[in-house]
Amino acid sequence: MTDTSLLHAAAPIDRFRALVMADPALQQRLSVIVDQEVFVEALLSAAADAGIAITADEANAGLTPDPLGLWRFNGAPVTSRTAPDGDWLPVAIVPSSGELAVDWAHFSGLPLVDSFFEDSLRRARHRPLNRLVRPRTPLSTLLDSVGENPPVPAGFVFHQSRCGSTLVAQMAAADARNVVVSEAVPIDTVVQLATVRTDLPIDERLRLVRAVVGALGRDRMGGAGHYIVKLDSWHTIALPLFRLAFPDTPWIFLYRDPVEILVSHARMAGAQTVFGAMSFDPYGIDESMAMPPDHYAARALGRTAEAVIEHLGLGGGMLVNYAELPEAMAMRILPHFGIAPDEEALAALATASGRNAKAPNERFVHDSGDKQQEAKDGLRAIAALYMDEPYRHLEGLRRAGEK
């Protein structure tokens, strides 16, 4: 049976899905429709124009909600050997029929302005188009999707966790011309792969890192601004990888008083400080299984800082203490990234600096005093054991760099 006859033998809704994926203009028309009833009307009209008979019930049945993105765990085969372009962004890298594959979502009209990439992805998943079609392509297509010259970030934001990195990202995103990607899972997956799979040639691993960063940095909104990537806290361990992949991209490392970090994690633990939450242990903590959870968290957080101290000599880095925010954004961080904000950008920065980055309806206030008051003696002892020494070292390096 030929491909054409197979397509005609498929269910009408699947034939329409194939039509959508072959027609970027139709994708664009459907992508901006948020209301399901309106979307179904548009779907039925487009299907009728193409000679595909679909009922409203069939159309609604084909729009299965997946707000958590559980579809990525189903192991389904790839849907195409060609990566979609334009407003399609990679949203997950998953096992699929014995190979790694990339899941894509359409982000038309959705700038990445949320506190985290996952928040923007959640909004995109709600769109009916992303419930109708879920493209999955081989991992190799990620390389093809960005071509020979993928977008290169103006700056990377490394951080020790709970140190103001979300505020920095939100301030950068306040200038609508910029593209800001915050802790995107596809980047983390590729960095894990590149860190663990040392059997793969380094050039191949570097191409993958450049490709996933480049694919997420497409200038979809036509703003022609700057591209900034906020990474996961453990990615300091992979600093040499990033320096090899992007030798000309400057980076910062945000850190703060260890007690204040641990108070934040005591309130709500970050996944990267919980033993076993990641697919591997990036910190090289030999005694991790025997450590109490709060000790493991502190040791992991201390290790993120130690990695920066070890790799600072690779160049391109700048240390920023949380206490310097938000003023350091305009005074130190943007200049370090080679960005000279104009009056419009400075006004946007000022507005964003007054908001709580993780709760935009609330005002930003320094909470160091509250956290110091909340800290118990036991927590202070743990901070002293695992985190104080690298903190003091970082402070010495930062002050020396300012002279």
Image (cartoon, rainbow, N blue to C red):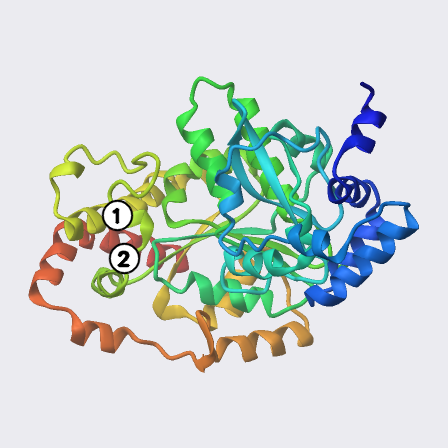
Q: Nearer the viewer, residue 298 or 80?
A: 80
Give me the residue at 40% from left, 27% from top.
196
Question: What amino acid type should be assigned to the residue bearing mark 1?
Answer: Val
Marks 2 and 1 close (CB-CB < 8 Å): yes
Quadrant in which residue 36 is drawn: bottom right
Query: Percent position (x, y) of residue 179?
Result: 64, 57
- The disc at residue 256 is none
Q: Is residue 403 visible?
A: no
- Relative to 283, is 1 above or below? above
Residue at x 31% of width, y 55% of height:
270
> Crowdedness of circle 1 by 10 Å Cα count: few (<14), some, many (20+)?
some
- Say which element carries label 1: loop
Tag 2: amino acid: Ala
Q: Is residue 292 left or right of residue 341?
A: left
Q: Position of residue 365 (x, y in %)?
A: 37, 79
Q: What residue is shown with label 2?
A: 269
| Distance from Cα at disc 2 to Cα at disc 1 | 7 Å
Q: Earlier in the sequence, mark 2 or mark 1?
A: 2
How packed mark 2 is, by other alpha carbons closer than 10 Å (few <14, some 14-19, many 20 or more), is some
Residue 113 image offset from top left, x and y in percent = 59, 65
| Label of residue 274 in the image | 1
Secondary structure state at the residue bearing disc 2:
loop
Residue 114 appears in the rendering: yes
Q: Viewed as shown, does residue 353 lie left or right of 338? A: left
Residue 332 rendering spot, x and y as whole percentages: 50, 63
Closer to the camera in the image, 402 or 87: 87
**Relative to 202, does residue 170 appear above or below in the rendering?**
below
Apparent side of residue 174 relative to residue 98 in the rendered image (left or right): right
Residue occupying image coordinates x 24% and y 77%? 369
